Image: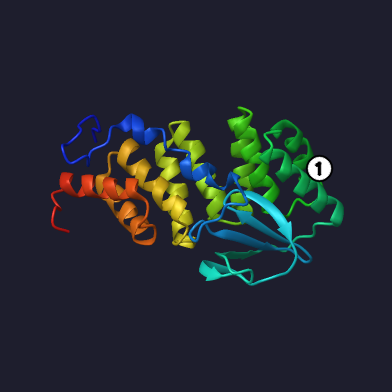
Amino acid sequence: MKHELKTKSGLAQNSTERKKERYAWGLFAMRPTVVSAFSPALRLCAKTAIVVALGSLLSLVSGCAANSGSLSRLPDGRLGFVIREKADMDEGARGEFERAVAMMNDGKNDAAIELLKRVIDRSPGVSAPYIDIALAYQRTGNPGLAEQHLKTALEMVPGHPVASNEYGLLLRKAGRFKEARVVYMKAINGFPDYLPVRRNLGILCDLYLNDPVCALKQFELYSERMPADEKVKMWVAELRIRLGRHNK
């Protein structure tokens, strides 16, 4: 699918502009104090700890809840997903984990990696530290180690939406487009309302797999829930024109 054409109506967009966005939804949650209605939190229950993922970086709070693969209202009022994990995380590990998240927010990824290694050693049954250390490894230019830890997280929680989103982005950057599609689809099957995966799958299909039908479907589903995203609206209009669906 070529993206060099610009139409008078402004519906077309070149591929370079679109590719610049490939990490937009992978990194949006690195600002864990900024949560929109449809950037769902992930709640992971251990015996005495809950891990809440504001997108990708994870932090610890107290409480417990049941599993759910669809959007639901969390006790604190936000929309999110609930995932239970049977694992212990003692206070020492919790403290180190929270410090590691703070370090990543401050750009101190190497120091965060060392802390997260200790957390994983002490609490190997919790997926959140694996996801965060993978993000830190990506930021420090170690995609191989990032992939290793994301795969571990996905073995623990198959289809984990945050881990899947990050893994799909990693695979796409490596040129492993078909693998990225499989990862995204597994996440959508388990968590169909997790919109970042739908957006990134649409971009993957559009720019890298030459599958405009797939791209249009994902962008339309995304746009129904995120009508304020004008870029995706533009992509939907462009794809409908190309596919001859002007009046849809």
Task: State the residue at coordinates (51%, 37%).
Answer: 170
* Residue 11, image quadrant: top left
Q: Which of the pair 129/76 is nearer the observer?
A: 76
Type of amino acid under label 1:
Arg
Q: Nearer the viewer, residue 46 or 27?
A: 27
Q: Position of residue 133 (x, y in %)?
A: 68, 40
Q: Is residue 189 left or right of residue 3?
A: right
Which residue is located at x 34 percent, y 36 percent? 208
Figure check: 88 above or below 99: below
Q: Residue at coordinates 51% horizontally, 43% vertically from top-left?
A: 26
**Residue denoted by label 1:** 118
Disc 1 crowd, CA 10 A, few/some/many (<14, 14-19, 20+): some
The residue at the point 38 percent across, 33 percent down is: 19
Residue in front for this viewpoint, 30 or 161: 30
- Tell me if residue 156 comes above or below residue 148 in the rendering: below
Compared with residue 16, is residue 234 higher up or lower down, i.e. above or below?
below
Residue 125: x and y, percent? 73, 55
Element at badge 1? helix
Where the N terminus falls, by quadrant?
A: top left
Give coordinates of residue 150: x percent, y percent: 60, 44
Placement of the C terminus among the 4 image quadrants: bottom left
| Image location of residue 47, percent across then percent down | 77, 66
Q: Is residue 84 left or right of residue 25?
A: right
